[in-house]
Amino acid sequence: MTWTWKLEDADGNAIDTPDSDLGSQGDAESWLGERWREFADQGASAAILFEDGRQVYRMELSAAEE
């Protein structure tokens, strides 16, 4: 199985996503967890996780209000 992320901007347009072919869901979630702020700073507003091309879930990338 291959787990990958797709990043989108606020309009739903795809943003270039660094290579993220990962071996497990946990690896994929850790990978995004370490980088999501950087992606948000570059204009990404959502990340979509895929398992072998099948969408698993979509997550909004926004920092919590303080």
Image (tube, rainbow, N blue to C red):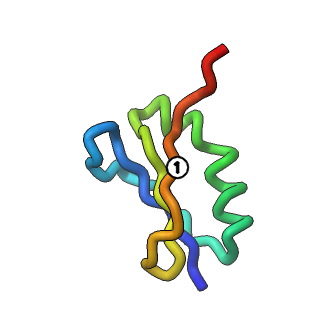
- Compared to 28, does 1 lie above or below? below
Three-letter amino acid code of the residue under disc 1: Met
Q: Residue 29: x percent and y percent? A: 67, 58
Pick the front one: 38 or 57: 57
Q: Secondary structure at mark 1?
A: strand
- Compared to 31, does 55 lie above or below? below
Query: Which quarter of the picture shows residue 3?
Result: bottom right
> In the picture provided, is 14 more to the left or to the right than 28?
left
Pick the front one: 58 or 52: 58
> In the picture provided, is 44 more to the left or to the right than 36?
left
Residue at coordinates 62% horizontally, 51% vertically from top-left?
A: 32
Kindly give the residue lying farthest to the top in the view shown: 66
> In the picture provided, is 28 more to the left or to the right than 16?
right
Q: Quadrant of the C terminus?
A: top right
Q: Quadrant of the N terminus?
A: bottom right
Pick the front one: 56 or 15: 56
> In the picture provided, is 43 more to the left or to the right than 28?
left
The residue to which callout 1 is attached is: 59
Residue at coordinates 59% horizontally, 28% vertically from top-left?
A: 63
